[in-house]
Image: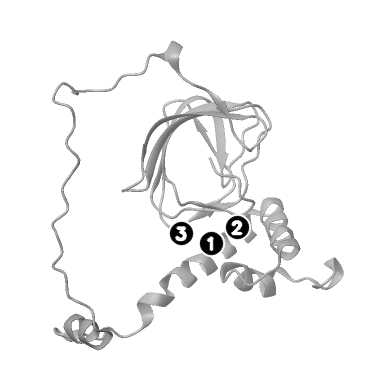
Amino acid sequence: MMNDDHRCFCELAPLYALDLLDFEERLWVEAQVLDCPDFAEELASYQTAVGLIPYSAPIVPMAADLKDRLFDKLGLDLVKAVPETQPELPPDLKMVAIRSADLDWQPRRIEGVQAVVLFRDEVSRIQHLVVKAAAGVIYPLHQHAGIEEIYMLEGELIIDDEVYLAGDYIRSYPNSIHAPFTNTGCMFLIRACIDDNYDLALNL
């Protein structure tokens, strides 16, 4: 591990994107990103490049009988796939409603943040939440595994030097990264992927 005097963001950022740094080096990179918005853009470009690596390889067509030959070599019986069926819902289930007085606010691992899980789908890996953050909360740097959508309800949320207020809508795309914060406190509705990567294991 390098000491702070010999650390260089331009050298560590690509390794961060490839997940090749140790814990302390990752924390150092994240601290630089929080101090300098230009570093956040640079790191995002590396993250995007890493995400595109699998797609740069040439496409090789798969042999039509590959599965049959593989199962035959392994001495296994080929079982035909059964079409997936959606679970049958109770006939009287037409809608679900949660009154504001019944919202089950739960503290999150980020100090000063509470959230209500409105809906969570393990199959699509999508969850809908209402989030409240106290004044001064800084979210950890994180990368989106899917599209994230935020609709502001109260207060202000600052992302990449842009201030978003009640009524504003924000969409972030897969592989994008940011570390939002709020000076005044805020509340928002969020639709996000369950698999978003929070580097400090702080999952909203």
Q: Which mark is residue 23?
A: none
Residue positioned 47% across, 53% down in the render: 144
Q: CA distance from mark 3 to mark 1?
A: 8 Å
Give the answer, above or below, for where 17 lies relative to 188.
below
Q: In the rendered image, which quarter is residue 92 located in?
A: top left
Residue 7's x, y, as percent?
78, 70
Please name the amino acid that badge 3 sits on: Asn
Q: CA distance from mark 2 to mark 3?
A: 13 Å
* Label 1 secondary element: helix
Please name the amino acid that badge 2 sits on: Ala
Q: For the residue carrying disc 2, how many other residues have a C-alpha within 10 Å: few (<14), some (14-19), or many (20+)?
A: many
Q: Are marks 2 and 3 in contact (CB under 8 Å)?
A: no
Give the answer, above or below, for where 83 lies relative to 18.
above
Residue 167's x, y, as percent?
41, 27
Residue positioned 59% across, 34% down in the render: 108
* Label 2 secondary element: helix
Q: For the residue carrying disc 3, how many other residues have a C-alpha within 10 Å: few (<14), some (14-19), or many (20+)?
A: many
Location of mark 3 (residue)? 175
Location of mark 2 (residue)? 40
Q: CA distance from mark 2 to mark 1?
A: 6 Å
Q: Nearer the viewer, mark 3 or mark 1?
A: 3
* Label 3 secondary element: loop
Residue positioned 64% across, 60% down in the render: 39
Q: Are marks 2 and 1 in contact (CB under 8 Å)?
A: yes
Return the disc, 3 or 1, that comes first in the chain's sequence.
Answer: 1
Relative depth, front residue between 191 and 123: 123
Residue 69's x, y, as percent?
19, 87
Q: In the rendered image, which quarter is residue 159 located in?
A: top right
Decide if residue 148 is on the left or right side of residue 63: right
Residue 152's x, y, as percent?
45, 29
